[in-house]
Structure formats: C-alpha cells, structure tokens
Image (spheres, rainbow, N blue to C red):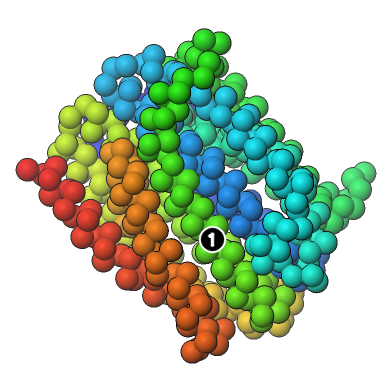
C-alpha cells in the first residue's frame, strides 16, 4: 500500500493512467457507497428520514466544495512544483492544507450552530422534516475540519504520485462509516438508538479517522513532502496560487449545491415522497459519476506534471486515453442501470410507493450519463493545466445557465417528469461546448 511514488512523466500511457486512476476510482466508489449507505439505512428508518437527509445534502455539497476546491488547487500546485523540480514549494503547499483545514472548519461550524433552521429552510427543508434534518446537520458539522483535511490531503498524495495512500484515507473513512452507522441509527448491541442523529455521529467519527490517517501519511519518512513545522507557517502567496486554481473548483461544486437547493425547493411542492425519490436517484447517479471523477482525478496530476515538464504530446495521449475509457465505462453503466432499475431501487427500500415513483424518474435522470465521462475528463484537464477559470465557466454553463433554469421551466410544462428531464437535457447541451473548447486546447498541444 505504501509506495515511493510513480514517475508521472515516463512509461506507457494507459497503464500509467490506470495506476493513477484506479486508487481514485476506489476512493470515489467508497465516497459514493458512503452516500448510498446513508440512504439505505435511513430509508429503512422512514421515508421522512430519507427526505431529511436529502434536504441536508446541499450542506454536504458545500462542505465538499470547500474541501475539493482547496485540495484540487493545492494538489495541482504541488504537482506543478514537483514537475518543475521545486519540491520546497510543494511542501509548503502541504503545510497550507493543514492550516486551511482548521481555519475553514471553524468558519463552517459557527454559522451552522448559530442558525440551523434558517439554513435548512434555505435548502428547501419543510416543517414536516425540519426536526430530523436539524438533528443530522448539527451532528455532522463538528467533523468538518477533519473532512476538509482528508479531502485536501488526498489530493496532495495523488500529486506526489502516491495514489494508493490517497485511496487508503478514503477507504478508512468509508469503512468506519459503514460499520458504525447501523449500530448508532438502530441501537444494535450496546449502542444507543439515535436515529438520524446516529447517522450524523457515524459520519463525524469517520471524518476524524480519515483526517488523522491523512496526517500520518503526509509525515511518512518516504513522503516527498517531508512535513516540518516551518512548512505549516501561513504563506499568502502560496494560498493565492492554490485558490487561483482551486477557487473555480469551489464555485463549480457550490453550483452543484445550488442545483440541489433548486431540486429541494421544487420537489417540496410534490411532497416527501418526491424528495425521497430525488435522494435515491441522486445517490445512484452519484455512484457512477463519482467513479468517473476518479478517472478525472487520476488525469489531473498527470496533465499537471507533464505540462510542467513540457511533455505536451504525452499530455495529449493521456487525455485521449482517459476519454475513451470514460465513454466505455459510462456507456456500459448506463445500460445496466436502465435495464435493472427496479431491482436496484427495491434493494434500498420496501416502500412500494417510493419504488414506483423512483423507477421511471431514475431512468430519465440517467439518460445522458454516457456523455458525463468525457466532460469530467476534459474539465480535469483544464484544472491540471492551471486553467481553473475555464473549468469553472464550463460547469457554470451546464448547472447555472442550463440545469437550474430548466428545473424551473420544465415542471410547469411536464409536471414532475420535467424535474427529472432537466438533468439529461442540460448534459447533452453542455457536452457540445466542452467538446469544442477541449478539442481546440488539444489541437494547440498537438502542433
């Protein structure tokens, strides 16, 4: 599991891509499974509990946006510094991650503790599920500093060519959650029955476990970061560089949170069953997209390193190989999910009404999934090149300028089916813009 790092500038393209991507694939699968485990157990607790979890999902997306954006910026910066043979700057970037995790965690906790109900109502929680949603939110927020740390550190570990360690951090987080959650939700054995608060407590404990492990990995003697106290001192110039690349990723993920808020508000008018349906659809859809992001996260440090080393032809070959693989994977996944939607959804809930509502909704929701893979690869290509603003604008185009407006327009014409159709329609339209810009960028490198 503990390797000395990969040479990102040499070796056959596809095997190198797989070496970098498969730990990310496993890690993203673990994250998706963690989301599914939440839905699985809370659906058995009650449909209202699942609806409350869905109402809290925008908050979790905000947590993820902060952690992923900062981590992507730090990882991209560190990879470029390693590629340019400037390891001290890469080590200083790792120090900033620890400093930022603590500071951002504190800034997250304060508003949630002071105004939980106002935040939940903003996210679309209605009175029927507000008490359950409040219990969950006020529990998980205490683990956010460790959540930020494990997300950011995972990016740093990938940036130095140690994807196995990045995978291990996320696996530990997921395993702890999977083991603890049913005991704390239902009161199995000596544990108290805490209901939805138990799900939040299990998540918080898992964040702490992953965060502590990530620190241990960064302090290994074999690590290129060579963590020292002097690297933990704030460096405003490095933080600025981190967010020049990472801030657009923060915005991209915040837009996803905005999409969830829009979904929640629109579906509130259709009742808790519709909100629970969204929870199942989004988490199963996320199972595949998280795996596709695993491929994208494997591409990003490869692109960053080879761009820093001036190996542009190799960079192009990496991107093309990743696109082909992502299309194949997402195409097969789409077919299987559409064909077996009913038995898959039945495995999550015994509520026949929820299954009846969710099956057609899910099939519509994932109709354009095959196009998501290449889009994720191309966006991570831009991030790896340090062009975070381009990546941000592409995501904003899909979610901000297409998906959110469609969510408000289509239900007025097509009813609840319009809510589910907004996702594939926006994906198809965005694909062509991303294809055009990516092809133009690759053409420049091919000269």
Task: Indicate left or right for 161 with 125 as reference.
Answer: left
**Image quadrant for the C terminus?**
top left
Task: Indicate left or right for 238 with 132 as reference.
Answer: left
How busy is the neighbourhood of tag 1: few (under 14 within 10 Å), some, or many (20 plus)?
many
Number of marks drawn: 1
| Residue 329 seen in the current view | no
Look at 90% across and 45% down and name the residue there: 191
Compared to residue 435, the image places residue 420 above or below, namely: below
Residue 257, image quadrant:
bottom right
Look at 52% across and 10% down and name the residue there: 230
| Residue 419 seen in the current view | yes
Between 232 and 302, the one lying in front of the other is 232
> x%, y% of residue 22?
43, 42
Compared to residue 287, the image places residue 173 above or below, namely: above
Compared to residue 442, the image places residue 223 above or below, namely: above
> x%, y% of residue 159?
40, 30
Look at 30% across and 49% down and name the residue there: 390
Task: Indicate left or right for 131 with 158 as reference.
Answer: right
Look at 70% across and 45% down and name the residue there: 111
Task: Indicate left or right for 136 with 278 as reference.
Answer: right
Q: Which residue is mark 1?
A: 258
> x%, y% of residue 17?
32, 40
Element marked by disc 1 = helix
Residue closest to the far left? 447
Residue 129, image quadrant:
bottom right
């Amino acid at each position: 599991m503990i390797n000395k790092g990969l040479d990102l500038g040499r070796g056959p393209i596809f095997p190198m891509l797989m070496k970098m991507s498969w730990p990310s694939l496993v890690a993203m699968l673990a994250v998706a499974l963690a989301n599914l485990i939440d839905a699985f157990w809370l659906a058995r607790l009650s449909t209202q509990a699942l609806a409350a979890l869905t109402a809290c999902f925008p908050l979790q997306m905000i947590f993820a946006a902060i952690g992923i954006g900062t981590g992507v910026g730090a990882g991209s910066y560190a990879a470029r510094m390693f590629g340019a043979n400037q390891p001290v700057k890469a080590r200083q970037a790792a120090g900033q991650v620890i400093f930022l995790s603590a500071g951002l965690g504190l800034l997250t906790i304060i508003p949630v503790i002071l105004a939980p109900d106002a935040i939940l109502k903003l996210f679309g929680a209605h009175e029927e599920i507000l008490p359950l949603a409040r219990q969950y939110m006020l529990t998980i927020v205490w683990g956010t500093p460790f959540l930020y740390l494990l997300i950011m550190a995972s990016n740093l570990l990938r940036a130095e060519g140690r994807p196995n360690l990045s995978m291990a951090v996320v696996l530990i987080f997921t395993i702890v959650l999977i083991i603890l959650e049913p005991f704390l939700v239902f009161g199995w054995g000596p544990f108290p029955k805490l209901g939805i608060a138990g799900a939040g407590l299990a998540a918080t404990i898992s964040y702490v476990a992953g965060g502590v492990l990530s620190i241990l990995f960064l302090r290994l003697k074999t690590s290129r970061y060579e963590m020292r106290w002097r690297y933990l001192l704030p460096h405003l110039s490095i933080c600025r560089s981190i967010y020049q690349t990472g801030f657009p990723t923060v915005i991209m993920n915040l837009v996803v949170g905005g999409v969830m808020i829009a979904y929640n508000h629109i579906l509130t008018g259709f009742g808790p069953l519709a909100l629970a349906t969204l929870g199942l659809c989004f988490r199963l859809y996320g199972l595949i997209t998280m795996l596709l992001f695993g491929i994208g996260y494997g591409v990003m440090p490869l692109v960053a390193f080879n761009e820093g080393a001036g190996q542009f032809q190799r960079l192009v070959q990496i991107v093309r190989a990743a696109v082909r693989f992502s299309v194949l994977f997402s195409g097969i996944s789409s077919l299987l999910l559409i064909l077996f939607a009913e038995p898959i959804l039945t495995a999550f809930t015994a509520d026949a009404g929820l299954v009846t509502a969710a099956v057609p909704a899910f099939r519509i929701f994932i109709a354009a999934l095959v196009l998501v893979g290449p889009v994720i690869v191309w966006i991570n290509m831009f991030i790896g090149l340090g062009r975070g603003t381009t990546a941000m604008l592409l995501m904003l185009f899909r979610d901000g300028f297409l998906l959110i407006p469609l969510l408000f327009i289509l239900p007025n014409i097509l009813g609840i089916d319009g809510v589910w159709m907004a996702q594939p329609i926006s994906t198809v339209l965005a694909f062509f813009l991303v294809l055009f810009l990516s092809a133009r960028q690759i053409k420049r490198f091919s000269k």
